[in-house]
Amino acid sequence: MGKYKITVLPGDGIGPEVISQAIEVIGAVGKKYGHEFALEEAMLGGCAIDAFGVPLPDSTLEVCKSSDAVLLGAVGGPKWDTLPGNKRPEAGLLGIRAGLGLFANLRPAVIYSSLKEASPLRADIVKDGIDIMVVRELTGGIYFGKRGRYQDEKMGEAAFDTEAYSTFEIERICRLAFEAAMKRNKRLMSVDKANVLESSRLWREVVVRLSKEYPEVELSHMYVDNAAMQLVRNPVQFDVIVTSNMFGDILSDEASMITGSIGMLPSASLGYGTLGLYEPIHGSAPDIAGQDKANPIATILSVSMMMKYSFGLDEIAKKIDTAVVNVLNKGYRTGDIASSGIKPVGTKEMGRLIKEEIIG
Ligand code: IPM
Ligand code: MG
């Protein structure tokens, strides 16, 4: 029997609703498999701004550091949209990624066979299914580079952000991507803009050098604009995609959309050790917050990733994944994935169904 400490950050908008269903699932698997999951709640994002005046209070970072894993709902909302950049809820998210050293973001984009019709792509493009793992660099690049404003003599007010990558940063994220590819179909697509950006040219050099250590993995390169196009033209060509922070931000949203619902997809942010941060890739959806409409599946699947990557509890991860598939196969849908004519279930009911499936 294992003992694990999980910090839970419900956040804003639909965050608390989807998190409470994920907590139910954690309770259920703990009981079924005899593990003790001790949960501690803390604040991040808009709620922390309201309570503490900052999006990432020191106390939150400390409790996260002292835990085995972190589960996050979502942050942000219109209420805090007019705050300056470094005081916004999103700054809390960036701060926690950097503060915990989580340089790798794993975003699987999987299409479920029972949800094929939810994909906006034609059936002949989706074929037998989409199963892509986007590995996004998470603590470098333009998100963390030098930025500022200045007065240009001729053109007036101006602003800049900097995309910078070191060999060290590129190597560690690409190594993780090669390792991920080794466990999958051994194909790695490195996405860059090496026809224009110097940082991308270094990226390409480093990944090519590193590929010598992984002779079994077939490495290819694609410019980011082409990758964006290929994702909708022929998504089944991709296995693992590795890319920079900003390109990964954009491409992972695109990859998620082609699977039909952003409400289905989890993510894991990892560093060197086993401490990881797990969150649905969807946002805080303030328009449907508090209405029992949100899809809790992405958050529940984030728990599955936590079991696997932080705790090494692969059997539990599989159990959760299978429970989700079974509930979908039985025809239950939340509003975001329901085709017309199907009466959707609410957040709580979807959570309950998955929990029942797990308990068996
Ligand atoms: C994401 C989000 C964040 C990002 C925002 C909220 C800062 O879009 O996790 O993809 O850009 O990283
Ligand atoms: Mg994003």
Image (tube, grey):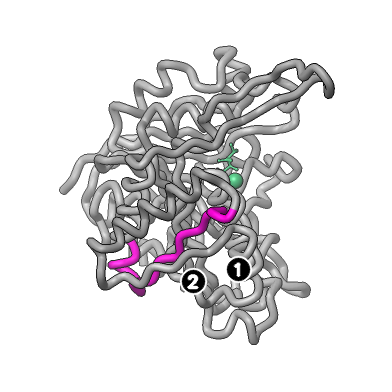
Q: Residue at x 59, y 34 (%)?
A: 75
Residue 306 shown left or right of residue 353 in the figure: left
Q: Residue at x 59, y 64 (%)?
A: 227
**Which one is nearer the viewer's eye here, 100 or 103?**
103
The segment highlighted magenta reads 180-195
250 over 143 or under it: above or below: below
Residue 238 marker: 2
Count residues near mark 2 (Cα–Cα under 10 Å), then give few for <14, some for 14-19, many for 20+.
some
Give me the C-alpha separation between circle 2 and circle 1.
Answer: 8 Å
Q: Is residue 227 visible?
A: yes
Residue 254 quadrant: bottom right
Callout 2–callout 1 Cβ contact below 8 Å:
yes
- Element carrying mark 2: loop
Quick one: label 2 or label 1, which is nearer the N terminus?
Answer: 1
33 over 38 or under it: above or below: below
Residue that protrudes farthest toward the front in the picture:
154
The residue carrying mark 1 is: 231
**Type of the residue with mark 1:** Leu
**Type of the residue with mark 2:** Phe
Measured from the top left, where is residue 133 in percent x and y?
45, 62
**Which one is nearer the viewer's eye here, 23 or 153?**
153
- Quadrant of picture, ligand 1: top right
Residue 274 shown left or right of residue 204 in the figure: left
**Label 1 CB sits under 8 Å from any ligand 2 atom:** no
